[in-house]
Amino acid sequence: MASPLVVDHAARSEQGSEWWRSAVIYQIYPRSFSDSSGDGIGDLPGVTERLDDLRRLGVDAIWLSPFMRSPQKDAGYDVADYCDVDPLFGTLADFDDMLAAAHARGIRVIVDLVPNHSSDQHVWFQEALAAAPGSAERARYMFREGKGAHGELPPNNWESVFGGPAWTRVIEADGRPGQWYLHLFDSSQPDFDWSNPVVWEEFRRVLRFWLDRGVDGFRVDVAHGLMKEDGLPDYTPDPDAGSMGGDAASVPYWGQPEVHAVYRDWRKVLAEYDGDRALCAEAWLPTIEKTALWVRHDEMHQAFNFEYLETEWDAAKLRAVIQESLRAYSAVGAPSTWVLSNHDVVRHASRLALTAENPQGHGIGPHSPGQPIPEVGLRRARAATALMLALPGSAYLYQGEELGLPEAIDIPDEARQDPTWFRTDGERYGRDGCRVPLPWVADAPAFGFSPSGASWLPQPAEWASHARDVQEADDASTLRLYQHLLAVRAGERLGEESVALEWLDWGVDVVALRRGERLFVAANLGTEPFALPVEGSVRIVASSAPVDGVSVESDTTVWFVID
Ligand code: NOJ
């Protein structure tokens, strides 16, 4: 095969239908990406200004975490108006400009949709508070009478994902404590009642609003949470499980079978458009087999592969999770997705070097056990990404991982903002450490994140060495590695399932495979160097750390061909 190992980006944007099957999708967390206004919080014009950097990186699409109107109690995942831009981030016109500029560069745009709950500032919730128990206004949320002689106890024992009870009692019009409302997350995030058709109608309207503007799809927040089991039975979660899912076979608020009807409905709404818009489920479920149910042919197009993200740095476990992902998703006709970092988990450049258990959502801070060694973490992160980007399916990248950013561990207590930190009285650090604003320019205020030097979370001083301008100029940088891997991935069409994948048995500590006729991929997760068991002259195409073409050091992934 004599095709080039890299491809022209403009040609790639012509790929045509079902782009999401193999796309590399870059997550923008708007408040931490790039601030054009100088208020210390990133914004949409900031995104527009940086699109050429993303084009140079070589991504196919961006997904933006919420930028809709919100009091920002949960960094925008508490939406007060689903069809407007929060002034913090700009205006609808700024959104349209950003969308047009992305499309002009062949980059598709996915927006976040938060259907499980709204903000308590949403007009519906304000109307519900003003209305009486039993009213149509209350029926759009989950209001219930309390238990106990005077209704003074919550309706059941459910806990909020962020810690503390999942119920809050309201004061009724007569000034007395009255009903309780359910909030699986913060008390400022009341859950909608998805057994009410009015809620369905409203979200069809929201979908069409953004589809009409031209978005390419939606990432659906807490997609496994919308339906609750009838009767709302008590449930006590496993304390060691991650907050968003849990290992229990049946949780009365996650993964209820009725939820699939919602996504079948939405798929029909998307089909009213040009047929190439996509839905991606954020569904934390106990097995890949279960997650695959979210992407049957008439439901969502993709679901995040959190099993893969949560797999430890172990060759046998990685092989198993990749094989199971490819099997389970292809059994329902969907592509697998791959993801290593996002705004809810410890960045993989730190997570892969943790030496103590760290359940998802708990975060790490200065007093956490098992602190990561930065060099080990970065080396593993580069190797993990090089393996991930060789796999068929769609890959999600989280802003800053292309700079090899570690988790920010030493955030002062008074600067922390995640509701998890407050709701657990500081027992869990939460997710601020993966949300610190990006360093763009080493020698600039706030490392180029904001013209005023403001930054809503403090940036570690050592991030100067991670700044994008420094890395653009350094052949050995993590940024240059990502750019190169993405270019080869595109040139060799590695995201496409039609390019064969053959597993190679090169030892217990090595994840080895061949893509297509000629590209070999080997990740050495062992502690000893590993000699490449091939004949002929090896030509290294990419490697996560320096290699000599004969052996591969520990925690290194290499892509090569044999000439
Ligand atoms: C999942 C989001 O990714 C997370 O950031 C948010 O706090 C919860 N859903 C609640 O919306």
Image: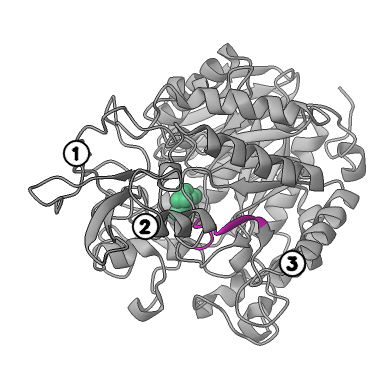
- What secondary structure is found at the residue carrying circle 3? loop
Which secondary structure type mostly characterizes the magenta part of the structure? loop
How many C-alpha atoms fall within 10 Å of the one at disc 2: few (<14), some, or many (≥20)?
Answer: many
Q: Does 76 lie within the magenta span?
A: yes
Quarter of the figure with residue 320: top left
Image disc number at residue 85: none
The residue under label 2 is 186
Residue at 36% across, 32% down: 228
Q: Position of residue 60 (x, y in %)?
A: 77, 43
The residue under label 3 is 91
* Residue placed furthest toward the front: 174
Quarter of the figure with residue 339: top right
The residue under label 1 is 236
Can residue 115 be seen at all in this image of the molecule? yes
How many C-alpha atoms fall within 10 Å of the one at disc 1: few (<14), some, or many (≥20)?
Answer: few
Amino acid type, callout 1: Thr
| Vertical comparison of 243 with 512: above or below | below
Q: Does 68 lie within the magenta span?
A: no
Which one is nearer the viewer's eye here, 530 or 145? 145
Label 1 near ligand 1 (CB < 8 Å): no
* Residue placed furthest toward the top: 331
Extent of the magenta region: 75-83
Q: CA distance from mark 1 to mark 3?
A: 43 Å
Q: Position of residue 189 (x, y in %)?
A: 42, 55
Which quadrant: the N terminus?
top right
The disc, 2 or 1, on the residue closer to the chain's N-terminal end is 2
Q: CA distance from mark 2 to mark 1?
A: 18 Å
